[in-house]
Image: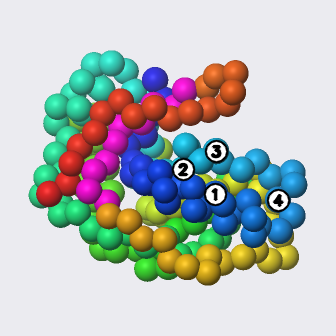
Amino acid sequence: MRCFIGIDLPPALKTQIVTWRDNEWPGSEGFKPVPPLNLHMTLVFIPALVESKRASIVKALDVSDIEPFTLTLDWVNHWRKPAIAWLSSKVPPIALKTLQSSVSTQCQQQDIKSPDVAREYQPHVTLMRKFKEPTSYPQPQQDWRFIVDKIHLFESRSGSNGVHYPIIETWSLG
C-alpha cells in the first residue's frame, strides 16, 4: 500500500487555511486545490508498504523522546516539479527536523524504503497541485500556529472522488 508518516493539521486550522487560500489566491482557476481533509505535512513517504513491514514499523517506531513543539505556518512558495504551491514555516523548528530525521532513520532500520532519503527534507503543506507559476501570490497575513504532539501513518487511497488519506496508526510525542 502507498503510505506516508506525517503530521495532521487540526481541523479548525485546515478550515482557516482553505478559507484564506480560496478567498485570497489570485488566478486559482486551472489549479487543483487540495481538499481540506487532505492537508498534512509529510515526514517520510513510503511508496510501497507491505503488511509485514507495516506491522514492524507500527511496533518499532518510537517518538517518545521528542517533546511536543509549536509549528508555525507563515510562508507560501512553490515548486515547478512537482507543480505545487505550498505552505511552510520560514524558520522550521529544530524539533521538526529532529522528528523527521528520527522517523526516517527508524524506517530505514526496519528496511522500509523511501525515495525521500536521497534529498534534504523540505517541510511543507501542499495547497494546490497542477500549479503554474504566477507573477505573484499572497503571503499569509497571519501566522498559523499549532502544537505537534503526535504523528500518524496515513494510507493514500484513490477513489471515485479523488485521493484521501485515512489515518491507520498514531504515535504520541513526549
Tag 3: residue type? Pro
Q: Nearer the viewer, residue 161 or 111?
A: 161
Which numbered circle lies on residue 28? 4
Q: Is residue 153 magenta?
A: yes
Residue 41 in sight in this render: no
Mark 1 and mark 4: span between their CA atoms? Answer: 12 Å
Residue 35's tag is 3
Residue 96 coordinates in the image, percent (x, y): 33, 65
**SS assignment at label 3:** loop
Q: Which residue is mark 1?
A: 18
| Disc assigned to residue 64 | none
- Contact (CB < 8 A) between labels 3 and 2? no
Label 4 crowd bin: few (<14), some (14–19), many (20+), radius 10 Å? some
Q: Quadrant of residue 85?
A: bottom right
Measured in 3D between alpha carbons, the distance from the residue under mark 3 to the one under mark 4, in whole angstroms, is: 14 Å
Mark whose residue sits in front, 1 or 2? 1
- State the extent of the magenta-drawn residues as a range: 148-157
**Relative to 84, is 164 on the left or the right?**
left
Say which element carries label 2. loop
Q: Secondary structure at mark 4?
A: loop
